[in-house]
Image (cartoon, grey):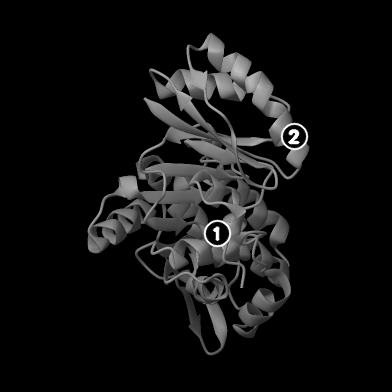
Amino acid sequence: MQLALTLVSPTPEAAQAAIGPITTALAGARARVKEPRVLGPGAVDLAVEADAIAPVRIAVANALEGLPVDACVQHWNGRRKRLLIADMDSTIIGCECIDELADFAGVKDRVSQITERAMRGELDFEQALRERVAMLKDLSVDVLQRCYDERVRLNPGARTLVRTMTANGAGAFLVSGGFTFFTSRVAQAAGFQANRANTLIEAGGLLTGEVGSPILGREAKLAALREETAAAGFTPADALAVGDGANDLAMINAAGLGVAYRAKPIVAAEADAKVDYADLTALLYFQGYTAADFVTD
């Protein structure tokens, strides 16, 4: 079978230097590497002939251990995806919005500890969300806009990722266990076509400490993937899903290409590929886009 092996690094020399060790490692795994193709600064594509994908992934991971290089091994056919479905907090943006709201409420230490455990899969997501939102009771709703303006920033490459995929006919969907106040604004800033998230309940200009039901968590993210692909007339195999926490695992596992971005160990261990060093444009390189294809306006 023909596989696509893509190497991406913020240090261009590192990606090039990794080709030799990987070629040697793959030879030991009975896989043959064809001539590399440069996709962009620090991004290289290699066509690999192999009998199975699992030994190639293992050999590549071993060869890259300790190197600042991200890798993706996938089937060559079908690598260009028709839908992007992305988590928001700590994936498309560089913070956890609920932790930042908690900072304004003076309870960030308590809330962020729960967030970390929930993202690691150590706590039930729904229960953990309700517990954290309860600590925001009586926070002025005006703080939401202030939090967005002062704390929320797109991660490097996020807008280019979304804009490039949509310019090439793909759908882009933002799905979050966070809150619609933030997803609606982040979706617009990055270029997503639609978004789903949870709703903070407010009354009299203050947060009530409650969140709307049903809670959008792990299963709801999976449902969003299935519903959006079905509505567009294709299957989850045609989708790319990216996230960082345990509540992203179901959609990451169901997608044709599931990527762990700066992810918790439980997610990184199960995803098809992980991005620990490069920015989000790595997801474009994984699909075979070149830097010349990127939409950066």
Residue 127 horizontal/vertical position (percent): 46, 53
Residue 73 versus residue 250 in the image, above or below: above
Quarter holding residue 147: bottom right
Quarter holding residue 158: bottom right
Instruction: Tell me how far mark 1 sits from mark 2, CA to CA.
Output: 23 Å
- Residue in front for this viewpoint, 183 or 295: 295
- Give the amino acid type for the residue marked by disc 1 in the picture: Asp
At 27% from the left and 59% from the top, the residue drawn is 227
Q: Residue 150 vs residue 167: left or right? A: right
Q: In which quarter of the image is the C terminus?
A: bottom right
Q: Quadrant of the N terminus?
A: top left
Q: Residue 11 vs residue 25: left or right? A: right
Q: Work out whether mark 1 precedes mark 2 in sequence or the reverse, and give the earlier one.
A: 2
Using a 10 Å C-alpha cutoff, classify the residue at mark 1 as few (fewer than 14 neighbours), some (14 to 19) or many (20 or more).
some
At 55% from the left and 78% from the top, the residue drawn is 207
Which label sits on residue 14?
A: 2
- Give the amino acid type for the residue marked by disc 2 in the picture: Ala
Residue 101 horizontal/vertical position (percent): 65, 69
Mark 1 — residue? 293
Res. 237 visible in picture: yes
SS at mark 1 in the image: helix
Quarter holding residue 44: top right
